[in-house]
Image: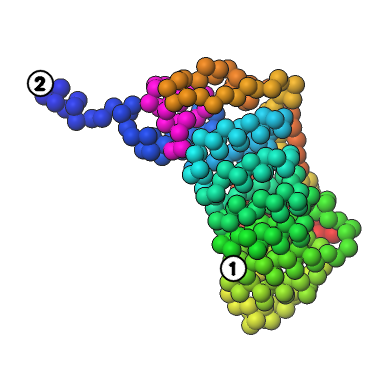
Amino acid sequence: MEVASEASDFRHWDELIPDALGLIFTNLSLKELLTVIPLVCKSWGKAVMGPYCWQEIDIEEWSEGCPEPQHLDRMIQMLIARSCGSLRKLCVSGLKNDMIFSFIAEHSNSLQTLSLPRSEISDSIVEQTIGRLSNITFLDLSYCGKIGFRSLEVIGKNCKLLVKLFRNMHPVDTVGMPIADDEAHAIAATMPRLKHLEMAYHVISTESALQILKSCTELELLDLRGCWGVKLDDDKFLEKKFPKVKVLGPLVEDLYEGNNWEEYSYYSDASSEYLAWEFVDDDDYFDDDESYDEMWDGDGRLEQLELRFYQGNEHETEGGFGWPPSP
């Protein structure tokens, strides 16, 4: 009787409320959430298909190695649908078209953090849809080469809560280009509440950098590393005029060993067929768990050159991050 009494004091895992399960499941990988948890038991399957696991979606690492744009689009659509309008954070790399950005905007009114580095979205789609993302406080549009000052201007006018913006560029994309201050002017004119701004490797002038410092009065960090047109060598001037702001650059002090940029490789299968992702009812199990495995296995390789800002990696050197050399 005592054993039975003690056993009754413990609650079975499958009886935990869905939001508690969702909180626990956030510690698992994307693959485990999609291919393992749904097959454990019915209650876990319901939890992982509901909004509890998908209020914060970070598939940036997975998306960097996704070989087919349609696979990435389907994954985004499926996970956002599961969030049921409660999505607060979305991190994904390399959107390939305007339609998927429009889908994100239409179904993510509660979004506060949006990270879309290396995405091929246009000024026109940003102008059309950004009004639906007015709650954003953090935005990463680094390496997005198809947008410019028009997007930044409309973002500043609509996203009044924005306090952190990453708009870093790749040095290969800006080398040899003439001074272009239009993006800096757009930021200075429309984003006065920024506290953290990264504009590494932009081809901007000293005047536009000073305009940002003067206009963004709440700024705490300004990253201008690799912005070789900016001359802010007088530390005493900066400390006197902008005592609350830490300015990084334009000098890049940390180098990759051998001047080689970091190289990443991913498992992918560019020849794999289109995966028929299905939205599953709460009362069902996943019927096609093998299709999920296809997303993770393959013989191909996808290599990219990229810079990592404020992220640790296996090539991190003692005392700082690796950077390409100054020109």
**Whether residue 227 is visible:** no
User: Is 194 displayed left or right of 262 in the figure?
Assistant: left
In the displayed structure, 217 sits above or below 76; it is: below
The numbered dot on residue 161 is: none
Q: How many marks?
A: 2
The numbered dot on residue 193 is: 1
Of callouts 2 and 1, which one flags the residue occurring earlier in the amino acid sequence? 2
Q: Are marks 2 and 1 in contact (CB under 8 Å)?
A: no
Q: Residue 55: x, y in percent?
A: 49, 43
Q: Residue at x 89, y 58 (%)?
A: 176
In the displayed structure, 57 sits above or below 153; it is: above
Q: Nearer the viewer, residue 213 or 88?
A: 88
Q: Quadrant of the N terminus?
A: top left
Q: Quadrant of the C terminus?
A: bottom right
In the displayed structure, 15 sits above or below 199; it is: above
Q: Main secondary structure of the magenta part?
A: helix
Q: Residue at x 42, y 28 (%)?
A: 46
Q: Residue at x 62, y 70 (%)?
A: 192
Q: Nearer the viewer, mark 2 or mark 1?
A: 1
Q: Is residue 37 magenta?
A: yes
Are there few (<14), some (14-19), or many (20+) residues within 10 Å of tag 1? some
Secondary structure, mark 1, is loop
Q: Nearer the viewer, residue 116 or 81?
A: 81
Q: Residue at x 63, y 78 (%)?
A: 242
In the displayed structure, 91 sits above or below 68; it is: below
Label 2 belongs to which residue? 1
Please, what is the three-letter code of the amino acid marked with disc 2? Met
User: Is 12 displayed left or right of 220 in the figure?
Assistant: left
Q: What's drawn in magenta, residue-wise?
A: 33-52
Q: Residue 87: x, y in percent?
A: 51, 44
Q: Is residue 75 magenta?
A: no
